[in-house]
Amino acid sequence: AVTDALPFYEVGDADHVIEAAESAAGGTLRSEVEIRLKIFEGALSLPPSRSTMTTTSTFRAASDTTLELTVDKTEVKESSLAQIPGFAALDTFAFPSRQLFDTVAPSAGGVNLELIYLTPSLRISRELVNDVLFVHTKV
């Protein structure tokens, strides 16, 4: 919801990397989303820029079919703006998402996902509170 409220951008490719912990009861999810900024389109436009917003989350099995997913941090990676003097720190900036969400409410940075269907190439899950369906395919 925070990202959706930002103006002047388009979302590009999105990748998810899931790494199971040794116990297999949880692990990490790294979500990488290409963001293209378009500021002042037209006669006064700035050069288009792109970056990869990387959000790292942890998950644990709440049941056989439900995962509890908690956002840990969000980082800007590979930003074309980092090439501009004064903006180099963008590529090393990590937003402490979990700490911020915890100050709002203890569960604000987390969601419960019900796994509906899973194959080696397809994952369908549903966020339980808002009943949002997610379909992911393996590339």
Image (spheres, rainbow, N blue to C red):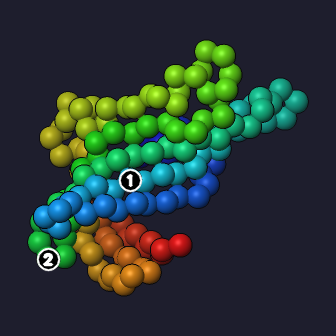
Label 2 Cα neighbours within 10 Å, binned few <14 / some 14-19 / many ≥20: few
Cα distance, mark 2 to mark 1?
A: 22 Å
Is residue 83 left or right of 133 when viewed as pictured? right
Q: Is residue 67 above or below residue 122?
A: above
User: Residue 80 sits in which quadrant?
Assistant: top right
The residue pinned by badge 2 equals 64
Q: Residue at x 31, y 61 (%)?
A: 19
**What's under tag 2, amino acid-wise?**
Asp
Image coords of residue 57 (percent x, y): 30, 50
Q: Residue at x 29, y 80 (%)?
A: 116
Which residue is farthest right?
Answer: 43
Which residue is farthest top?
Answer: 86
Q: Residue at x 58, y 58 (%)?
A: 13
Residue 104 visible (yes or no): no
Label 1 Cα neighbours within 10 Å, binned few <14 / some 14-19 / many ≥20: some
Residue 1 visible (yes or no): yes
**What's under tag 1, amino acid-wise?**
Arg
Callouts 2 and 1 close, C-beta under 8 Å: no
Number of on-image labels? 2
Q: Residue at x 52, y 58 (%)?
A: 14
* Viewer-nearest of discs 2 and 1: 1
Image coords of residue 49 (percent x, y): 69, 37
Is residue 125 left or right of 65 when viewed as pictured? right
What secondary structure is marked by label 2? Answer: loop
What secondary structure is marked by label 1? Answer: strand
The residue pinned by badge 1 equals 30
Residue 13: numbered disc:
none
Of the two numbered discs 2 and 1 on the same chain, state the one appearing first in sequence: 1
User: Residue 2 sits in which quadrant?
Assistant: top left
